[in-house]
Image: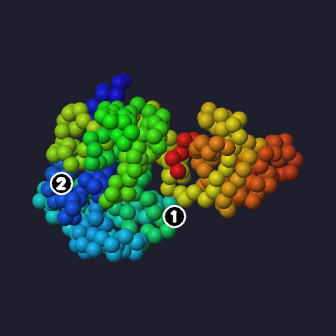
Protein backbone atom coordinates (compact mmCIF):
# COMPACT_ATOMS: atom_id res chain seq x y z
CA UNK A 1 0.00 0.00 0.00
CA UNK A 2 1.08 3.63 -0.38
CA UNK A 3 2.46 5.45 2.63
CA UNK A 4 -0.71 7.43 3.34
CA UNK A 5 -2.85 4.30 3.47
CA UNK A 6 -0.18 2.63 5.59
CA UNK A 7 -0.10 5.58 7.99
CA UNK A 8 -3.87 5.57 8.37
CA UNK A 9 -3.92 1.82 8.99
CA UNK A 10 -1.16 1.92 11.61
CA UNK A 11 -2.70 4.82 13.52
CA UNK A 12 -6.13 3.17 13.51
CA UNK A 13 -4.88 -0.27 14.53
CA UNK A 14 -2.01 0.58 16.92
CA UNK A 15 -2.42 -0.84 20.40
CA UNK A 16 0.77 0.55 21.98
CA UNK A 17 2.71 3.73 21.16
CA UNK A 18 5.89 5.29 22.50
CA UNK A 19 5.83 9.09 22.55
CA UNK A 20 9.12 10.91 23.06
CA UNK A 21 9.25 14.62 23.90
CA UNK A 22 12.46 16.61 24.25
CA UNK A 23 13.66 19.43 26.47
CA UNK A 24 13.36 22.03 23.72
CA UNK A 25 9.63 21.30 23.46
CA UNK A 26 8.90 21.11 27.20
CA UNK A 27 10.84 24.14 28.42
CA UNK A 28 11.20 27.86 27.87
CA UNK A 29 13.54 30.49 29.30
CA UNK A 30 11.78 30.20 32.68
CA UNK A 31 12.02 26.40 32.99
CA UNK A 32 9.16 23.98 32.39
CA UNK A 33 6.56 25.34 29.98
CA UNK A 34 3.39 24.39 31.86
CA UNK A 35 1.15 25.41 28.95
CA UNK A 36 2.87 22.92 26.64
CA UNK A 37 2.99 20.14 29.24
CA UNK A 38 -0.69 20.59 30.12
CA UNK A 39 -1.65 20.32 26.45
CA UNK A 40 0.60 17.24 26.01
CA UNK A 41 -1.01 15.46 28.97
CA UNK A 42 -4.49 16.30 27.66
CA UNK A 43 -3.60 14.71 24.32
CA UNK A 44 -2.11 11.59 25.89
CA UNK A 45 -5.21 11.26 28.05
CA UNK A 46 -7.32 11.44 24.88
CA UNK A 47 -5.31 8.65 23.23
CA UNK A 48 -5.45 6.64 26.46
CA UNK A 49 -9.25 6.93 26.39
CA UNK A 50 -9.18 5.27 22.94
CA UNK A 51 -7.74 2.08 24.49
CA UNK A 52 -4.19 2.90 23.44
CA UNK A 53 -1.32 1.89 25.70
CA UNK A 54 0.84 5.01 25.97
CA UNK A 55 4.48 5.13 27.06
CA UNK A 56 5.93 8.62 27.47
CA UNK A 57 9.68 9.26 27.22
CA UNK A 58 10.19 12.73 28.64
CA UNK A 59 13.29 14.89 28.85
CA UNK A 60 13.32 18.16 30.76
CA UNK A 61 14.80 17.29 34.16
CA UNK A 62 18.12 19.11 33.71
CA UNK A 63 16.44 22.15 32.19
CA UNK A 64 13.92 22.23 35.02
CA UNK A 65 16.73 22.03 37.57
CA UNK A 66 18.61 24.84 35.86
CA UNK A 67 15.57 27.07 36.15
CA UNK A 68 15.44 26.48 39.91
CA UNK A 69 19.15 27.14 40.44
CA UNK A 70 19.42 29.98 37.90
CA UNK A 71 23.23 29.67 37.87
CA UNK A 72 24.03 28.40 34.39
CA UNK A 73 27.83 28.65 34.75
CA UNK A 74 27.94 26.40 37.82
CA UNK A 75 26.15 23.40 36.30
CA UNK A 76 27.82 22.90 32.93
CA UNK A 77 30.13 20.11 34.14
CA UNK A 78 28.82 16.54 34.55
CA UNK A 79 28.35 16.66 38.36
CA UNK A 80 26.44 19.92 38.03
CA UNK A 81 24.17 18.52 35.33
CA UNK A 82 23.52 15.41 37.39
CA UNK A 83 22.65 17.52 40.44
CA UNK A 84 20.38 19.73 38.31
CA UNK A 85 18.69 16.58 36.98
CA UNK A 86 18.07 15.37 40.54
CA UNK A 87 16.45 18.70 41.39
CA UNK A 88 14.47 18.95 38.18
CA UNK A 89 13.30 15.33 37.85
CA UNK A 90 11.15 15.48 40.97
CA UNK A 91 9.54 18.71 39.79
CA UNK A 92 8.97 17.31 36.31
CA UNK A 93 7.33 14.15 37.66
CA UNK A 94 5.24 16.08 40.18
CA UNK A 95 3.87 18.14 37.30
CA UNK A 96 2.99 15.02 35.30
CA UNK A 97 1.40 13.35 38.33
CA UNK A 98 -0.89 16.29 38.99
CA UNK A 99 -1.90 16.79 35.37
CA UNK A 100 -2.55 13.10 34.65
CA UNK A 101 -4.49 12.80 37.92
CA UNK A 102 -6.82 15.57 36.71
CA UNK A 103 -7.77 13.21 33.86
CA UNK A 104 -8.22 10.24 36.19
CA UNK A 105 -4.99 8.59 35.00
CA UNK A 106 -2.22 7.16 37.15
CA UNK A 107 1.33 7.88 35.99
CA UNK A 108 4.50 6.02 36.99
CA UNK A 109 8.11 7.19 36.94
CA UNK A 110 10.78 4.85 35.58
CA UNK A 111 14.43 5.97 35.38
CA UNK A 112 16.73 3.79 33.29
CA UNK A 113 20.40 3.43 32.38
CA UNK A 114 21.74 1.42 29.46
CA UNK A 115 22.93 -1.24 31.90
CA UNK A 116 19.30 -1.87 32.91
CA UNK A 117 18.54 -3.04 29.38
CA UNK A 118 21.87 -4.69 28.50
CA UNK A 119 21.50 -7.28 31.27
CA UNK A 120 19.05 -9.85 29.86
CA UNK A 121 17.48 -10.70 33.22
CA UNK A 122 16.95 -7.05 34.11
CA UNK A 123 15.59 -6.43 30.61
CA UNK A 124 13.01 -9.18 31.09
CA UNK A 125 12.14 -7.88 34.56
CA UNK A 126 11.64 -4.40 33.09
CA UNK A 127 9.44 -5.84 30.36
CA UNK A 128 7.27 -7.56 32.97
CA UNK A 129 6.98 -4.32 34.95
CA UNK A 130 5.91 -2.34 31.88
CA UNK A 131 3.43 -5.04 30.93
CA UNK A 132 1.83 -4.92 34.38
CA UNK A 133 1.65 -1.12 34.43
CA UNK A 134 0.05 -0.97 31.00
CA UNK A 135 -2.46 -3.68 31.92
CA UNK A 136 -3.51 -1.47 34.86
CA UNK A 137 -4.03 1.51 32.55
CA UNK A 138 -1.03 3.38 33.93
CA UNK A 139 1.01 5.73 31.73
CA UNK A 140 4.72 5.16 32.43
CA UNK A 141 6.90 8.29 32.23
CA UNK A 142 10.47 7.35 31.32
CA UNK A 143 13.73 9.29 31.52
CA UNK A 144 17.40 8.40 31.58
CA UNK A 145 18.76 8.14 35.10
CA UNK A 146 21.14 11.07 34.66
CA UNK A 147 22.13 11.18 38.32
CA UNK A 148 23.97 7.84 38.15
CA UNK A 149 24.83 7.36 34.46
CA UNK A 150 28.31 8.86 34.15
CA UNK A 151 30.34 6.39 32.13
CA UNK A 152 29.69 6.20 28.40
CA UNK A 153 28.83 2.51 28.71
CA UNK A 154 25.97 3.33 31.10
CA UNK A 155 24.44 6.16 29.07
CA UNK A 156 21.91 6.02 26.25
CA UNK A 157 23.30 9.36 25.07
CA UNK A 158 19.90 10.92 24.49
CA UNK A 159 16.23 10.12 24.96
CA UNK A 160 15.75 9.58 21.23
CA UNK A 161 17.91 6.48 21.61
CA UNK A 162 16.13 5.45 24.80
CA UNK A 163 12.75 5.84 23.10
CA UNK A 164 13.74 3.64 20.18
CA UNK A 165 15.02 0.90 22.51
CA UNK A 166 11.76 0.92 24.47
CA UNK A 167 9.89 -0.03 21.28
CA UNK A 168 11.24 -3.54 21.67
CA UNK A 169 10.67 -3.67 25.42
CA UNK A 170 6.96 -2.77 25.24
CA UNK A 171 6.32 -4.22 21.76
CA UNK A 172 5.07 -0.89 20.43
CA UNK A 173 3.39 -0.40 17.07
CA UNK A 174 4.37 3.24 16.53
CA UNK A 175 7.11 5.66 17.63
CA UNK A 176 6.10 9.32 17.83
CA UNK A 177 8.85 11.91 18.28
CA UNK A 178 7.75 15.42 19.25
CA UNK A 179 10.26 18.08 18.23
CA UNK A 180 10.52 21.85 17.84
CA UNK A 181 10.28 21.77 14.05
CA UNK A 182 7.41 20.67 11.85
CA UNK A 183 9.09 17.51 10.60
CA UNK A 184 12.13 16.38 8.62
CA UNK A 185 13.40 18.99 6.18
CA UNK A 186 14.39 17.81 2.72
CA UNK A 187 17.71 19.66 2.90
CA UNK A 188 19.98 21.17 5.53
CA UNK A 189 18.43 24.60 6.23
CA UNK A 190 21.88 26.02 7.00
CA UNK A 191 22.90 25.30 3.43
CA UNK A 192 19.60 25.43 1.54
CA UNK A 193 17.27 28.38 1.98
CA UNK A 194 13.60 27.53 1.86
CA UNK A 195 14.02 23.82 2.59
CA UNK A 196 10.58 22.23 3.00
CA UNK A 197 9.31 19.41 5.19
CA UNK A 198 9.13 15.95 3.68
CA UNK A 199 5.70 14.44 4.35
CA UNK A 200 7.16 10.94 4.07
CA UNK A 201 10.58 9.28 4.19
CA UNK A 202 10.32 6.06 2.21
CA UNK A 203 13.73 4.69 3.22
CA UNK A 204 15.39 6.30 6.23
CA UNK A 205 18.48 4.11 5.73
CA UNK A 206 19.13 5.79 2.38
CA UNK A 207 19.33 9.31 3.84
CA UNK A 208 22.73 11.00 4.13
CA UNK A 209 22.28 12.16 7.71
CA UNK A 210 25.59 14.04 7.90
CA UNK A 211 24.57 16.17 4.92
CA UNK A 212 20.93 16.51 5.85
CA UNK A 213 21.11 17.36 9.54
CA UNK A 214 22.48 20.33 11.43
CA UNK A 215 23.89 20.46 14.96
CA UNK A 216 22.38 19.59 18.33
CA UNK A 217 19.82 21.76 20.08
CA UNK A 218 21.00 24.09 22.82
CA UNK A 219 18.88 22.79 25.69
CA UNK A 220 18.72 19.14 24.69
CA UNK A 221 21.25 16.60 23.48
CA UNK A 222 19.55 15.35 20.34
CA UNK A 223 18.73 17.32 17.23
CA UNK A 224 17.29 15.85 14.04
CA UNK A 225 20.32 13.61 13.54
CA UNK A 226 19.58 11.55 16.64
CA UNK A 227 15.87 11.46 15.79
CA UNK A 228 16.57 9.96 12.38
CA UNK A 229 19.08 7.52 13.82
CA UNK A 230 16.37 6.38 16.22
CA UNK A 231 13.94 6.13 13.31
CA UNK A 232 16.44 3.82 11.61
CA UNK A 233 16.44 1.52 14.64
CA UNK A 234 12.64 1.59 14.78
CA UNK A 235 12.46 0.83 11.06
CA UNK A 236 14.60 -2.28 11.47
CA UNK A 237 12.19 -3.53 14.11
CA UNK A 238 9.31 -2.97 11.70
CA UNK A 239 7.97 0.07 13.59
CA UNK A 240 7.25 3.33 11.71
CA UNK A 241 8.10 6.75 13.16
CA UNK A 242 6.03 9.92 13.07
CA UNK A 243 7.89 13.18 13.74
CA UNK A 244 5.57 16.01 14.77
CA UNK A 245 5.85 19.64 15.93
CA UNK A 246 5.56 19.17 19.68
CA UNK A 247 4.58 22.73 20.57
CA UNK A 248 1.63 22.80 18.16
CA UNK A 249 -1.70 22.66 19.97
CA UNK A 250 -3.40 19.25 20.01
CA UNK A 251 -0.93 17.93 17.44
CA UNK A 252 -1.33 14.29 18.54
CA UNK A 253 -5.12 14.41 18.48
CA UNK A 254 -5.12 16.06 15.07
CA UNK A 255 -2.67 13.51 13.68
CA UNK A 256 -4.72 10.56 14.93
CA UNK A 257 -7.85 12.13 13.49
CA UNK A 258 -6.24 12.11 10.05
CA UNK A 259 -4.76 15.58 9.62
CA UNK A 260 -1.61 15.51 7.48
CA UNK A 261 1.34 17.00 9.35
CA UNK A 262 4.90 16.22 10.25
CA UNK A 263 6.95 13.46 8.63
CA UNK A 264 5.97 9.79 8.39
CA UNK A 265 9.01 7.48 8.29
CA UNK A 266 8.21 4.08 6.87
CA UNK A 267 9.52 0.91 8.49
CA UNK A 268 11.28 -1.98 6.84
CA UNK A 269 8.75 -4.31 5.23
CA UNK A 270 10.14 -7.24 7.20
CA UNK A 271 11.30 -6.38 10.69
CA UNK A 272 14.20 -8.16 12.35
CA UNK A 273 13.73 -10.49 15.30
CA UNK A 274 13.36 -8.87 18.70
CA UNK A 275 16.27 -10.98 19.94
CA UNK A 276 18.62 -9.53 17.31
CA UNK A 277 17.39 -6.03 18.09
CA UNK A 278 18.14 -6.52 21.78
CA UNK A 279 21.53 -8.06 20.99
CA UNK A 280 22.65 -5.21 18.72
CA UNK A 281 21.23 -2.20 20.55
CA UNK A 282 21.15 -3.08 24.23
CA UNK A 283 24.69 -4.44 24.44
CA UNK A 284 27.82 -2.33 24.73
CA UNK A 285 30.18 -2.28 21.73
CA UNK A 286 33.68 -3.42 22.67
CA UNK A 287 35.56 -3.42 19.40
CA UNK A 288 35.60 -3.25 15.63
CA UNK A 289 36.23 -5.80 12.91
CA UNK A 290 37.18 -4.62 9.41
CA UNK A 291 36.25 -6.84 6.49
CA UNK A 292 37.22 -6.90 2.83
CA UNK A 293 34.81 -5.93 0.07
CA UNK A 294 33.97 -9.52 -0.81
CA UNK A 295 32.95 -10.29 2.76
CA UNK A 296 30.97 -7.05 2.97
CA UNK A 297 29.00 -7.94 -0.16
CA UNK A 298 28.32 -11.45 1.10
CA UNK A 299 27.09 -10.20 4.48
CA UNK A 300 24.86 -7.53 2.97
CA UNK A 301 23.26 -10.04 0.63
CA UNK A 302 21.71 -11.61 3.72
CA UNK A 303 21.91 -14.82 5.69
CA UNK A 304 25.71 -15.14 5.62
CA UNK A 305 28.10 -15.55 8.53
CA UNK A 306 31.38 -13.66 8.76
CA UNK A 307 34.31 -16.03 8.22
CA UNK A 308 37.85 -15.26 9.44
CA UNK A 309 39.00 -15.26 5.80
CA UNK A 310 37.12 -12.00 5.22
CA UNK A 311 38.59 -10.17 8.23
CA UNK A 312 41.47 -7.77 7.47
CA UNK A 313 41.81 -5.86 10.76
CA UNK A 314 40.74 -6.09 14.40
CA UNK A 315 40.51 -3.22 16.89
CA UNK A 316 39.68 -3.21 20.59
CA UNK A 317 40.22 -5.59 23.48
CA UNK A 318 37.02 -7.60 23.30
CA UNK A 319 36.36 -11.08 24.60
CA UNK A 320 34.50 -13.97 22.97
CA UNK A 321 30.79 -13.21 23.12
CA UNK A 322 31.23 -9.42 23.11
CA UNK A 323 29.43 -7.18 20.63
CA UNK A 324 31.62 -5.67 17.89
CA UNK A 325 31.03 -3.39 14.92
CA UNK A 326 31.68 -4.74 11.43
CA UNK A 327 32.95 -2.15 8.95
CA UNK A 328 34.65 -1.95 5.56
CA UNK A 329 38.17 -0.65 4.98
CA UNK A 330 36.60 2.72 4.08
CA UNK A 331 34.84 2.84 7.44
CA UNK A 332 31.36 2.14 6.06
CA UNK A 333 29.15 0.34 8.57
CA UNK A 334 28.14 -3.22 7.69
CA UNK A 335 26.54 -4.30 10.96
CA UNK A 336 27.21 -5.52 14.46
CA UNK A 337 27.39 -8.95 16.04
CA UNK A 338 28.69 -11.19 18.80
CA UNK A 339 32.21 -12.39 18.14
CA UNK A 340 33.01 -16.07 18.56
CA UNK A 341 36.61 -15.12 19.35
CA UNK A 342 38.47 -12.63 21.51
CA UNK A 343 40.30 -9.81 19.74
CA UNK A 344 43.65 -11.56 20.22
CA UNK A 345 42.32 -14.89 18.95
CA UNK A 346 40.67 -13.31 15.92
CA UNK A 347 43.85 -11.41 15.03
CA UNK A 348 45.69 -14.73 15.00
CA UNK A 349 43.31 -16.38 12.51
CA UNK A 350 42.05 -13.46 10.41
CA UNK A 351 42.52 -13.94 6.68
CA UNK A 352 42.81 -17.72 7.01
CA UNK A 353 40.69 -19.95 4.81
CA UNK A 354 38.14 -22.41 6.10
CA UNK A 355 40.32 -25.39 5.15
CA UNK A 356 43.15 -24.03 7.31
CA UNK A 357 40.84 -23.66 10.30
CA UNK A 358 39.60 -27.24 9.89
CA UNK A 359 43.17 -28.52 10.04
CA UNK A 360 43.98 -26.58 13.23
CA UNK A 361 40.76 -27.63 15.03
CA UNK A 362 39.59 -24.10 15.79
CA UNK A 363 36.37 -24.20 17.90
CA UNK A 364 34.37 -22.12 15.40
CA UNK A 365 34.46 -21.78 11.63
CA UNK A 366 32.69 -18.40 11.84
CA UNK A 367 34.11 -15.22 13.32
CA UNK A 368 30.50 -14.07 13.79
CA UNK A 369 27.61 -16.43 13.12
CA UNK A 370 24.73 -15.08 11.05
CA UNK A 371 22.31 -15.79 13.91
CA UNK A 372 24.29 -13.34 16.04
CA UNK A 373 24.81 -10.68 13.36
CA UNK A 374 22.57 -7.71 12.54
CA UNK A 375 23.30 -6.16 9.15
CA UNK A 376 22.76 -2.41 9.05
CA UNK A 377 22.86 -2.01 12.83
CA UNK A 378 23.07 1.64 13.92
CA UNK A 379 25.64 1.40 16.73
Question: For mark 1, does the 10 Å Cα neighbourhood hold few (<14), some (14 to 19), or many (20 or more) residues?
Answer: some
Compared with 80, 367 (above or below) is above
Mark closer to the chain start, 2 or 1? 2
Query: Up-down: is 96 above or below 273?
Result: below
Q: Please give the name of the residue rendered at 71% of the width and 35% of the height, measured from the top-left corner.
A: 294
| Element at label 1 | helix
x and y, in percent, of residue 325 in the image: 60, 50
Q: Let me know if residue 99 appears in the view.
A: yes
Which quadrant of the rendered structure holds the N terminus? Answer: top left
Residue at the spot 25% in from the left edge and 44% down from the top edge: 245
At 29% from the left and 58% from the top, the residue drawn is 23
Q: Quickly name the residue at label 1.
A: 153
Distance between the Cα atoms at labels 2 and 1? Answer: 33 Å
Q: Are discs 2 and 1 less than 8 Å apart at CB?
A: no
**Which residue in the rendered view is the most extreme toward the top?**
1
Residue sitting nearer the eye, 157 or 130: 157
Side of 240 relative to 276 (left or right): left
Q: Residue at x 66, y 59 (%)?
A: 316
SS of the residue under disc 2: helix
- The numbered mark at residue 279 is none
Crowd band around label 2 with a 10 angstrom C-alpha radius: few (<14), some (14–19), many (20+): some
Locate residue 185, reporting x and y percent.
34, 37
Circle 2 sits on which residue? Answer: 36
- 266, above or below 96, in the image: above
Amino acid sequence: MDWQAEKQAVMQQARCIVVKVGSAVLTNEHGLDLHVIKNLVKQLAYLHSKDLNVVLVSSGAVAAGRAVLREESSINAVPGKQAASAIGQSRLMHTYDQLFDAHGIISAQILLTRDDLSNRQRFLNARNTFSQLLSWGVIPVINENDTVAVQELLKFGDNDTLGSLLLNLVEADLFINLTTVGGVLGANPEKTAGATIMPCVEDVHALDLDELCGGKTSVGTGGMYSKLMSARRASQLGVPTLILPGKAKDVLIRAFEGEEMGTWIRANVRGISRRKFWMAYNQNVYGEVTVDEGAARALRSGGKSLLPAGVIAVEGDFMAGDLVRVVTADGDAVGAGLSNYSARELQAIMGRKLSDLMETNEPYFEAIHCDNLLIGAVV
